[in-house]
Amino acid sequence: MAVIHHTTLQPTKLELLASWLPTRDWYTGREGGPSPAKAGGFRLDDPAGEVGIEFMVVTDGTEEGAAAYLVPMTYRGAPLEGADHALIGTTEHGVLGTRWIYDGVHDPVLAGEVYALLWGNAVAQHQSVDDTPDPTVSAIAPAGGAAAAGAEFVRVVDGADHTAVVVRPAGAPEELTLRVRRVLRSAEDDGVPGSGRITAEWTLPDGSTARGTYVTA
């Protein structure tokens, strides 16, 4: 299990996101500029123990009706080759030193663990507590198929309010598209019958809890 270090980050993840969000086509904009506030999410473990994986939800501000964005992130101790375009920024970690933070949809490790989560071969972890599963995260595999031993990262295609991560399950002739929601909506289900999905919660600015689709497959 990944160890969560309760230490300093300079700059913080939210500070990096305040600069990065306006560069995304799916960011809807906010008068006065972005004001990201952490609103939930969960983590996944890298079996190799090298890459941190976090699905973070941020609301753009704390006023009623603030948009909620899903930002999957990976944390690495060295640059990911060929992924300069996906770099959110670098930060100085109080224990681990320099960390490279990436938009996780472009990271093969995250893609592989999302695939594993859908098929029940990975367990969603609490966002801020070591070695603690998050029972509020629900994963349902696509109908009509069998889980492969893993999935190879193929490509990423950006949409208006989602990012499509295309993978090829090991030994399978066909590709599988993981649609990662970027703009979250409570109780939304944008999948087709028989599709797989990951649903989870986040906190609204008024303190209430929302639930919706994070990923469809």
Image (tube, helix red, strand yellow):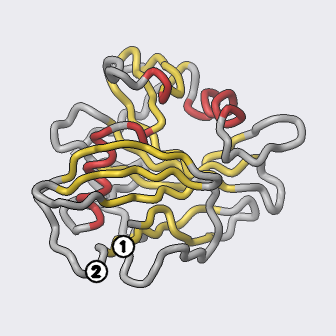
The amino acid beneath tag 1 is: Gly
Residue drawn at point x = 49 percent, y = 62 percent: 214
Count residues near mark 1 (Cα–Cα under 10 Å), then give few for <14, some for 14-19, many for 20+: some
Where is residue 181? Give x, y as percent. Answer: 54, 58
Q: Are the residues flagged by discs 1 and 2 in contact, CB closer than 8 Å?
A: yes
Q: Amino acid at mark 2?
A: Ala
Q: Residue at x 49, y 55 (%)?
A: 41
Q: Horizontal placement of 93 versus 26: left or right?
A: left
Q: Position of residue 112 (x, y in %)?
A: 26, 49
Q: CA distance from mark 1 to mark 2?
A: 7 Å
Residue appearing at x 67%, y 42% in the figure: 25
**In the picture shown, does residue 23 fall above or below 124?**
above
Vertical comparison of 37 with 214: above or below: above
Q: Residue at x 67, y 55 (%)?
A: 68
Q: Residues within 10 Å of mark 2 (few under 14, many from 20)?
A: few
Displayed quadrant of residue 40: bottom right
Disc 1 is placed on an element classified as loop
Q: Which mark is residue 141?
A: none
Q: Secondary structure at mark 2?
A: loop
How many discs appear?
2
Q: 74 and 158: which one is in front?
A: 158
Q: Name the residue beneath numbered marker 1.
A: 196
Give the residue pinned by disc 2.
143
- Mark 1 or mark 2: which comes first in sequence? 2
Q: Is residue 217 left or right of residue 91?
A: left
Q: Can you say whether 189 is above or below 85 in the image?
A: below
